[in-house]
Amino acid sequence: MAAPVDLELKKAFTELQAKVIDTQQKVKLADIQIEQLDRTKKHTHLTDTEIMTLVDETNMYEGVGRMFILQSKEVIHNQLLEKQKIAEEKIKELESKGQTGSASGSLPVVKPP
């Protein structure tokens, strides 16, 4: 009688371990994505800060694939602000998913018998 119970416990434990590993991998991936988005946000902020020091009539080249397109300073500034805004929104989204996921999917640490 003890053998079927042990098999069921072992099966449940392996399933729980798989869930824990999967959750840890998702958390690591979210952290990496947040770091990348934060870097992007900082880079666009620094670029925008440097661009704003230039004269308003300055035209700039925007890299598109293998070519460059001549754009006004205002257009580039607006694109950089939009890029920052999108990065901030994605960071908030990932952080909120992490908080809700960790609260609902938190698994207790269980040691095998």
Image (tube, rainbow, N blue to C red):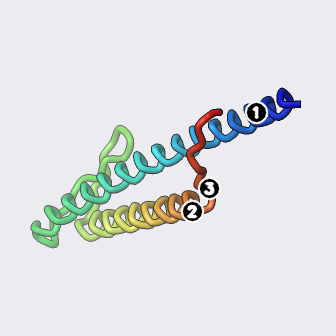
Q: Is residue 27 above or below residue 82?
A: above
Image quadrant assignment for residue 92: bottom left
Image quadrant assignment for residue 41: bottom left
Q: Is residue 16 above or below residue 103?
A: above
Question: What residue is drawn where x is 42% and y is 49%?
Answer: 31
Image position of 13 (left or right of 29): right
CA neighbours of label 2 inside 10 A, class few (<14), some (14 to 19), many (20+) = few
Image spot of residue 73 (x, y percent): 23, 66
CA neighbours of label 1 inside 10 A, class few (<14), some (14 to 19), many (20+) = few
Spot the residue most to the top.
Answer: 3
Cα separation between marks 1 and 2: 24 Å
Cβ atoms under marks 1 and 2 closer than 8 Å: no
Q: Amino acid at mark 2?
A: Ala
Image quadrant assignment for residue 70: bottom left
Q: Nearer the viewer, residue 24 or 33?
A: 24
Q: Is residue 102 above or below residue 20?
A: below
Image spot of residue 97 (x, y percent): 54, 61
- Image depth: mark 1 or mark 3 in front: 1
Image position of 8 (left or right of 64): right
Q: Which residue is mark 1?
A: 11
Q: Which residue is mark 3?
A: 105
Image position of 60 (left or right of 103): left
Q: Which residue is mark 2?
A: 103
Cβ atoms under marks 2 and 3 closer than 8 Å: yes
Q: Amino acid at mark 1?
A: Lys
* Residue 22 appears in the figure: no
Q: Amino acid at mark 3?
A: Gly
Cα separation between marks 2 and 3: 6 Å
